Image (tube, rainbow, N blue to C red):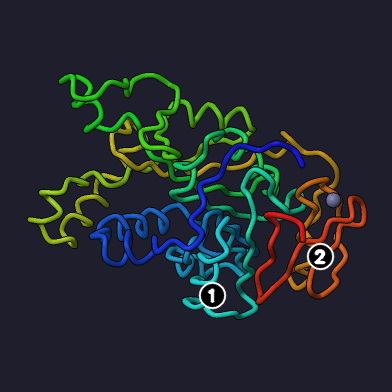
Amino acid sequence: MTKTPPVCNYEGSDYQTSFWDKGGREYEDRTEAIALKQLLPKTGRLLLELGAGAGRNTPRYLGFDRIVLLDYSRTQLEQAQRRLGTTEKYIYVAADVYRLPFVDGLFDTATMIRVLHHMADAPKALGQVRNTLQPGGTFILEFANKLNLKAILRYLFGRQVWSPFTLEPVEFVKMNFDFHPKAVRAWLQELGFSIEQTLTLSHFRVGLLKRLVPTGILVFFDSLFQWTGRWWQWTPSVFVKARRGKLQGIHGEETSPALHNVTAFFKCPDCRHQPLADRKEYLECLSCKKKWEVKDGIYDFREPM
Ligand SMILES: [Zn+2]
């Protein structure tokens, strides 16, 4: 197996309940809904949701024919299954973002929200996402911004040692990274993406405001300011809409399989062989002979059986 960076594992985590449902994050959740509505194509064929977790954002992608929910944690995907059901529309995949198990050019759209935050090697992860997208496909990326107003003020007043102005990521808690907007743009452009839109979110992520002002009012004002992201990005959360270039990074043929043929979506994450053979309880790589488990509606590409 090729060596890949460490992953942040939410296995067995109650993240959905503790952070979103009871953690006073309604404001952040609603501002994300507004940004997604702005950026996401209204309809589409096949969408990849990277770091889908318990499926909090998934109902916002209903205009797509089928949706692949990808997460490293199987228990998060089980929560998503309970929330969304096991209909044809959703395909659940446990996999490592550095070893994505999809054939090149499969998806017309991909989203990655609150995930780059945990990437020790962000350009490597972004490169994997690029390969799974069709030429001309849409990528919606959210990242945590180190150049946010609070970090700038703390730095200027000597309350924080790291500089928000330098381009390298800052790991402020283990496996939690904030990025400089300029660095993220440069990575995307190097990978052949063109950036079409930038929105800034959570202008009012301040504890006192969130306690004193009704959430609906904060959400409304945030939505008024989101579009200023095209000029400056001083908020803790930034959304970017990027499009995969038509020419860059294409290796081999890129024809998307029929939507009902889910087995044809996958390649071996270790040796990249495709197609895999469908043995019901697992998919088998005919090249390296590894077996990838399919159990209770979840395709598991983290470790071979
Ligand atoms: Zn293989």
| In the image, residue 55 above or below residue 173 | below
Q: Which mark is residue 247?
A: none
Horizontal arrangement in the rendering, residue 89 relative to residue 250 (left or right): left
Residue at the farthest right position: 286
Q: Residue 81's mark? A: 1
Vertical comparison of 77 with 120: above or below: below
Whether residue 7 is situated above or below residue 259 in the rendered picture: above
Label 1 secondary element: helix
In this image, 263 relative to 12: left or right? Answer: right
Residue beneath label 2, please?
283
Left or right: 58 as drawn, with respect to 212: right
Q: Quadrant of the N terminus?
A: top right
Label 2 to label 1: alpha-carbon separation: 21 Å
> Sequence-wise, which precedes: disc 2 or disc 1?
1
Residue at 52% in and 55% down: 51
Q: Looking at the image, which residue is at 60% across and 66% down?
A: 67
Label 1: few (<14), some (14–19) or many (≥20) C-alpha neighbours in 10 Å: many
| Residue 83 placement (x, y as % from top left) | 47, 76
Give the percent coordinates (x, y) of residue 184.
49, 31
* Mark 2 closeness class: few <14, some 14–19, many ≥20 residues within 10 Å: many
Under circle 2, the secondary element is strand
Q: Residue type at mark 1: give it.
A: Gln
Q: Residue at x 60, y 54 (%)?
A: 109
Q: Position of residue 264 (x, y in %)?
A: 81, 63
The picture places residue 45, in percent across and down from the top left corner, at 65, 64
**CB of mark 2 near ligand 1 (< 8 Å):** no
Q: Amino acid at mark 2?
A: Leu
